[in-house]
Amino acid sequence: MAELADELVAAEALTVAARWDQAADAWGRVHALAMQVGDLELAQRGANERVEALRRDDRPASMLAALEEAMALAEGDARPALEVRLVAAMADIGQLRGAARVAGELLAKMTTPGLRLVVADTLAGVLLSRGDLLGLANLVEQLEAEARGGAVLAARFRRAQLQRMQGQLDDAAEGFIQIHQVLADHPQAAAAAGGALCELADICLIKGEFDECFAFLGGAAGHFQESRRRAALFQLEAERAMAVLTSGATFLPGLLDGPVDYAGSRGLVLLEARTRLARGLCRVAGGSDAAWADLDAAVLLAETAGAPILAGRARLERFLAGFGEEGGERTVDDLRQAMEDLTGDRVWHSRAMVLLGQAVAATRPGEAIELAGRALCRFQAMALSEDERSASRVLALVSSR
């Protein structure tokens, strides 16, 4: 019993200090010792705390194993709460199809209002990664109808994400600004506040508003540092690299070695895909042949995980970087696949339409006109003037032939 008491004190101290890697091991020992002496209540606490520490330490694969132990002891509302963690861990390791299925089944049987909203919000994140906008739209409506208290803000966040994907950029930006204003001064919501600023940075990048984009990314970094979430900081670094490249400047690819290695070593598949995509483009800009390995890996990781929008973005960026630059059906087919993958993202789907129209202008002028014309109408509705000019140039190219 003395050993158990000592381990409990140590685990609690490590948790307070946010030393999550050591805390996870300490809570594992608490769980094991409590099981030996038959203290099931403390064993349950040890198992649950270990799951939480592993989540905060960005170790989803280890978290899945810990969840099995915790769920074996869970009773009442404790079990569905752990099942929500299971969905999140599955998504992190790239099992998006399975995560969507488990979350959907859990939502269908969930009756506890608070937990039901947590499940719905978790499922919304998975559907967003899956590019399932119809499912996401239905779920957002459900969230908005059922949300109470703090959950109203979560529903607003998902609504803004949906608006961004649908190309309603100004409405989405307004939502994210409002969300950040509410969360900015609440340390316990630092990660969500940082997420709102990252979304705003993405919208500014789409519009070519680089100064505003970098300002939002800087603010997000502060929030993520406060929340001590390394994975979020590494994803932000990848986003910053992409923004720097888009602005016409250079970004040293070596700065992304740490994020890529971190994601790979922890099985964070989607993060690895994003960081490899960013590093690959940095290497392209630097003329390194190693770029193609990164870009190919980004496509494969996202595709295998069931994240079509991320896969499509990686395919599109690979095409723009010069993949198959001598032309041919392989290039066009890959671009068609990118366009199909990006169907759930109105902005990037429209950009892919323009690029495909340009690629087939000489051989399929009718298709090129249709693609560029549709994209032009979309860009006009989204008030993306530079993209409008790109679509117009394709139309002019076809007309001049």
Image (cartoon, rainbow, N blue to C red):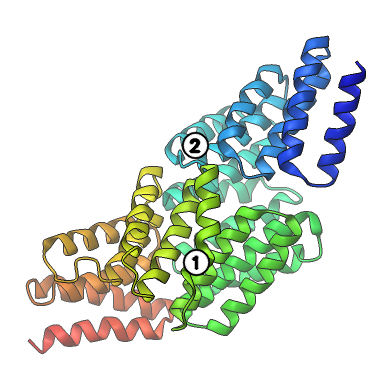
Kindly tell me whether residue 198 is visible in this rendering.
yes
Drawn side of residue 234 relative to residue 187, left or right = left
Amino acid on which the number 1 mark rests in the picture? Gly
Quadrant of the rendered image containing residue 363: bottom left
Residue ID for mark 1: 254
Drawn side of residue 274 relative to residue 377, left or right = right
- Nearest the viewer among 226 and 177 is 226
Amino acid on which the number 2 mark rests in the picture? Ala
Kindly tell me whether residue 202 is visible in this rendering.
no
Residue at the (60%, 53%) spot, across then down: 231
Residue 179 x/y as whole percent: 69, 64
Drawn side of residue 40 relative to residue 162, left or right = right
Residue at the (66%, 30%) spot, across then down: 82
- Nearest the viewer among 146 and 385 is 385
Does residue 251 sit above or below 269 in this rendering?
below
Quadrant of the rendered image containing residue 42: top right
Quadrant housing the C terminus = bottom left
Residue at the (64%, 78%) spot, across then down: 215
Mark in the foreground, 2 or 1: 1
Residue 79 x/y as whole percent: 67, 25
Mark 1 Cα-neighbour bin, 10 Å: few <14, some 14–19, many ≥20: few
Residue 9 x/y as whole percent: 90, 32
Q: Earlier in the sequence, mark 2 or mark 1?
A: 2
Residue ID for mark 2: 99
Does residue 301 sit above or below 222 in this rendering?
above
Q: Secondary structure at mark 1?
A: helix
Residue 243 x/y as whole percent: 50, 75
